[in-house]
Image: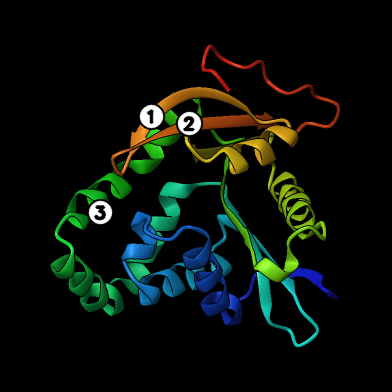
Amino acid sequence: MAWSIAQLRPEHAAAAAELHRQGQPGTFLTRLGASFLTALYAQMAQSPVCVGVVALDDAGQAIGVAVGSTDTNAVFKEMILRRGLRLVWPVAGAVLRDPGLVRGVLQTLLYPEQAGGDEVGDDVGEFLYIGIAPQLRGQGAGQALYEALVEGMRARGIRRLGLVVEASNAGARRFHERNGYRPQRELTMYGRPMLWYEVSLAEGDAPPPASSIEA
């Protein structure tokens, strides 16, 4: 099918949220509900600290999305300041239905420090999410989205890009390792074992050496 790459815009937020829900069912952010995810993507589409790209079909519908940030902590602060009141009831409802989400909320507030640790600096960004619709798989759209995201991050002065991936997600790990990422350390988020991966975005740089973590 035909598709094109474009910048993530607020009008793509609902479709991007649905792609996220389909791609990561049962994870903390999706359990907070569609309203929260849609607001998050709308915020990232407008945030000066985010880079977002989408794959669009011929009708202009977002069928793929990739997002990253130069300051993940700022994204959540912006979310609270600009959209907090509108999200109180949807999030409160999700927490009432699933009280275990309280712990996830606290971990999310602490997430940037836990994920990036002491290595995060002015030239280090984070690759937050990539997802595509099933009908787009195998057509190179995921790689095209990733490369567009990297160019956007380089334009913001980012020289190293990190990401968190679930240790058991073999498919995601293979994708990132093909793009030069190497696992740097282990961490636990939302009760699940995770890995922090990192890659240099400087032209001509070799991937960082793998740590002692088994890849």
Observer-side mark, 3 or 2, equals 2
Which residue type carries mark 1? Leu
Whether pointer 1 and pointer 2 mark residues with C-beta atoms closer than 8 Å, the reply is yes
Is residue 156 in view? yes
Numbered disc 3: secondary structure: helix
> What's the distance in space between the residues labelled 3 and 2, CA to CA?
20 Å
Label annotation for residue 105: 3
> What's the distance in space between the residues labelled 1 and 2, CA to CA?
6 Å
Of the image marks 3 and 2, the number of the one nearer the N terminus:
3
Q: For mark 2, what is the residue? A: 195
Numbered disc 2: secondary structure: strand
Q: Pinpoint residue 80: horizontal percent, then vertical percent.
A: 32, 64
- At a point 45% along the width and 74% down the height, the residue shown is 38
Q: For mark 1, what is the residue? A: 187
Is residue 158 in view? no
Which residue type carries mark 2? Leu
- At a point 72% along the width and 51% down the height, the residue shown is 146
Q: Is residue 118 above or below residue 129?
A: above
Q: Nearer the viewer, residue 180 or 69?
A: 180
> What's the distance in space between the residues labelled 3 and 1, CA to CA?
17 Å
Q: How many marks?
A: 3
